[in-house]
Amino acid sequence: MMNNKLGRIAGYSLIAGLGLSLLTACGGSSSNGSAKSSTASFSVTDAPVDDIDAVKITFSRIDLKPANGDIVSLTFDEPVVIDNLLDLTGNAASPIISDAVVPAGDYQWLRIFVTGGFPDSTVLPKLGNETDLFIPGQQNGNANNNGTPRSLKLNTGFTVPTGGNADFTIDFVLRKGLTKPANSDHYLLRPAMRLVNNVEVGTISGTVDNTVIASNACGPTGISVYLYEGDLNANSQVPDDIYDPNINADIDEVSDDVSGQRPISSAEVSMNDSSVYTFEIGFVRATEAGYSLALTCQSSLDDAASDDDINFIEVLPVVVTANQTSELSFTQPL
């Protein structure tokens, strides 16, 4: 794992070359970096999705809500364009704002503003033409009923320490968040996101044995690993698919709290140059409760809009330590 921020973001370019600055900071933040202010940086990454070649997305602003105080709006000099969010898997991430001066303290939530539709935000499916990408409600107009621009809200608390720099990553879980409404000519990016503090995260990487790939349990319908909170085996629990009963609702906010045995992230399994099947999940928050990783060869059958009965081949427990890589291998074909 690359432990420094530059290593994580190397190789990814942004239109306007990160021409970002803090134009508005409501809520009493200091512009001279006094003891009551700090700096905060935000990057984006994603968990992959089947049947899509590219997801282009344009960001224009982030709002932060202090526990005590007015909303802090971080508006960019130039829009930040990610040419393909699907490139940012594993430990890869791209910054959308760096070293913004903000009030120190606890925060309740953040909102991220997306410029929807062609040419700013689009989806290129493996089969088909490039089409518009919107966030919920934006396909009918960019403003809410109260006239404010539409955005994606993440109800996750976080802390910016006094006099320091907080470094966060927003993980877009595209397997859950990217949908195409029935009988529509556009895609929607729903609020399926995780927020992590980069000083608290580690990486999970590993391999899948060729005998597992060649077994009768593994057909050519999408080979992926799903990440779950806790040790499913120790708790006599079974992994479940990605499913959101509210997927068709016009909602613009999400909490990253997880209930039941639904996965919180995923990674595709792919063959490397040495003909070894590998995977990697980055930006996993270290926790004493640990995690479980489940292997499926039916991820392409997993539709977030339905509760699908997909098969899992093997479930392995894993412990994640901050700034370290946990390695494991799937070796047991059914």
Image (cartoon, grey):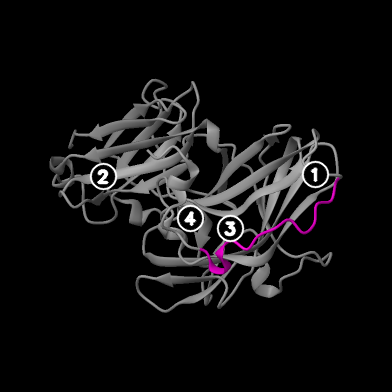
Q: CA distance from mark 2 to mark 3?
A: 29 Å
Q: Which mark is residue 116?
A: none
Residue shown at 42%/79% (left/top)? Answer: 129
Q: Position of residue 262 (x, y in %)?
A: 47, 40
- The residue indicated by pointer 1 is 32
Highlighted magenta segment, given as a residue range: 14-27
Q: CA distance from mark 3 to mark 4?
A: 9 Å
Q: Amino acid at mark 4?
A: Leu
Q: Are marks 2 and 3 in contact (CB under 8 Å)?
A: no
Q: In the rendered image, which residue does mark 2 sit on? A: 278
Q: SS of the residue at dot 3?
A: loop
The amino acid at mark 1 is: Asn
Q: Which residue is mark 4?
A: 174
Give the alpha-carbon distance from disc 1 to disc 4, as whole Å. Answer: 38 Å
In this rendering, which labeled residue sits more in front, label 3 or label 1? 1
Among the two numbered marks 3 and 1 on one chain, the one whose residue lies closer to the N terminus? 1
Mark 1 or mark 2, which has the lower sequence index? Answer: 1
SS for tag 4? helix
Tags 1 and 2 touching, CB below 8 Å: no
Mark 2 and mark 3 lie on one chain; the one further toward the N terminus is: 3
Residue 127 drawn above or below residue 288: below
Q: Residue at x 38, y 20 (%)?
A: 234
Instruction: Say few, some or many: other residues with alpha carbon within 10 Å of mark 1 (under 14 / 14 to 19 / 20 or more).
Output: few
- First in residue order: circle 4 vs circle 2: 4
Magenta segment's dominant SS is loop
* Labels 1, 4: front one: 1
- Mark 2, secondary structure of its residue: strand
Q: Amino acid at mark 3?
A: Arg
User: Which amino acid, by three-letter code, is at mark 2?
Assistant: Thr
In the image, 101 versus 326, the foreground residue is: 101
* Mark positioned earlier in the residue sequence (1 or 4): 1
